[in-house]
Amino acid sequence: MIDIPSADAPVDAPRGRVLLIEDEPNIATAIGFLLQREGWRVSTHSDGRTALDAVVRHAPDVIVLDVMLPGQSGFEVLGGLRAGQNGTRADLPVLMLTAKGQTKDRDRAEALGVSRFMTKPFSNRELIEAVRDLARTAPG
Amino acid sequence: MPRSIPTGSRIRERRLALGRKQTAVAGTVGISPSYLNLIEHNRRAIGGSLLSRLATALETDRAALAEDGDEALIEELRAAAGAQQNNEAEFDDAPDLARRFPHWAGLIAAQARALAAQARTIEALSDRLSHDPTLADAMHELLSTVSVVRSTASILAQTPEIDANWLGRFHANLDADSRRLADGAEAVVGLFDRQAARGADRMLPSETVSRFLDDAGHRFDVLERDGVAAVPDLVGGLTGEDARVLATEILTGDAEDASRLPRALVEAADGPDDLIAAAGGDLALVLRRMGVVDPGRGLVICDAAGALLRRKPVAGFPLPVMGAGCPLWPVYTALGQPGRPLTVVVETPDGADWRVHAIAQAVAVAGFGAAPVIRATMLLTRTQSGGAGAPVGPGCRVCPRIECPARREPSVLSTRPDMLDMVDLTGDTLPRS
């Protein structure tokens, strides 16, 4: 778990919760900072194997999921999530991040039911807008 | 000419118009008169280079002879149009194009072929990029780091009011990540450098060792002096663990041979027979020592499968770098009669004579009832026999003896008579001492 000091966020009007599943601490720090500043409550998790437990524990509105994770890849986490494993909400919006912009990664993520796919390096604005869009179109 | 006249009939018509005989025309293009007769009566399909040759022989162009232009060319034109996903109906005049502008049509077809070949190359390269795990990992690392640097740098640039806590943290991250980025970039460059230098990596361990031994002339003074202790230093510079293991095995054997049959004795001997007693009757040892010590002699060692384990070439008797040798070599004859020492004279294609000593014997005996490991050794020494030598070659691929009954594969020389001439010429000018 990465400790993110609170940013100057509008705490009284939180947009919702984002769970950031990413093992690269500096990326997690940067993304965490950005989303917090936009009014999100951000939790981070860095292990693929226990990611679904973290989803249950944090009950996020949006998940930002990296493909390369220790223990279990982001694809497997996404598959488990969409199958409702561990009692997770199967329809949670998931934004997947990968450094491999290859079509087969994208195809695989789409086949598994990813909500949105983004390749690194991305711009901060792109990421923030993607998370906002996903939360808006999320069911329930 | 109307399109309905078949190609064969056109050929016949043209030949008769020129007043040429079937036999003469057939001879010119290299087919039998009866085959030409079948063609002329439209009972054999014709196209490709034969049609071109016939056109030349009949002093016309192939489009004038072909019933519908050149079918193969038309097919290629249609494929070229199809590859560009054009409306096929607009291209149904391909036969007209091929007939009226055969050279332009040929150009289109050639360009379509080149495009297809390039597409295959690109596919192979991109396939390699996505399947080269080292490259993929290095690129992934690089992109991840670029991503952090970009995000962090934009945060710093766009958040002037950022608090000191965060500022310190992002600066530290940026410092660490920019170093990682530099290392990652270096790693990728290193990877490409290695791939560029992969010429050496592509060699099999046996090729690496062969080249290493050949460069030294198979002769290592330090082994004669210091024995096995000198081996690790000698093989240390070789690329690849497998190559070093293989070279160690060979040089250890050489060092042991050297201690069993010292160089001074070998250099004093006129021929292998002089050394048999000193070698304790180990004939293969005698041949190996003479082969290694004397730069004027060649040495070949093979296993029971005929695979060449050691090949020390000698000027005038080239040995193939890859694959088996010439099936007529006495080293293979020896394999058929293990334990029987052979001495014969052979003649290489250039007319040079060689005295060959050969012996096949067990190198390892596991015990009674167990099959021995047999190796055959052959020593090559230049001699003169006045044409009494049995013909041998350097290995089929580079052997000009086209009619050889033992030939296993075509010679690269067989289709190039100019090179064959060169080989004969070389033979005539070689000194025969």
Image (cartoon, helix red, strand yellow):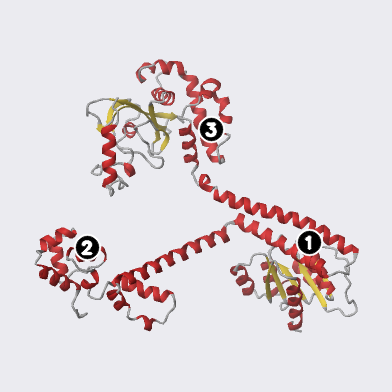
Name the image quarter holding the N terminus of chain B. Answer: bottom left
Q: CA distance from mark 1 to mark 2?
A: 72 Å
Residue B203 appears anywhere in the view: yes
Image position, residue B81 (x, y; %): 40, 76
On residue B248, the disc is 3
Specify the amino acid type for callout 1: Asn
Q: Which residue is mark 2?
A: B53
Q: Is A105 situated left or right of B14 in this image? A: right
Which image quarter: residue A66?
A: bottom right
Given this view, does label 1 or label 2 mark the residue nearer the observer?
2
Q: CA distance from mark 2 to mark 3?
A: 59 Å
Q: Which residue is mark 1?
A: A26
Name the image quarter holding the C terminus of chain B. Answer: top left
Specify the amino acid type for callout 3: Thr
Q: Is B286 situated left or right of B123 in this image? A: left
The residue positioned 76% from the left and 57% from the top of the image is B177
Image position, residue B62 (x, y; %): 23, 69
Dot 1: chain letter = A
**Placement of B46 over or under B276, stated as above or below:** below
Marks 1 & 2 on one chain:
no
Q: Is B76 situated left or right of A64 in this image? A: left
The residue positioned 88% from the left and 80% from the top of the image is A13
The residue positioned 58% from the left and 25% from the top of the image is B229
Q: Secondary structure at mark 3?
A: helix
Specify the amino acid type for callout 2: Arg
Q: CA distance from mark 3 to mark 1?
A: 49 Å
Marks 2 & 3 on one chain:
yes
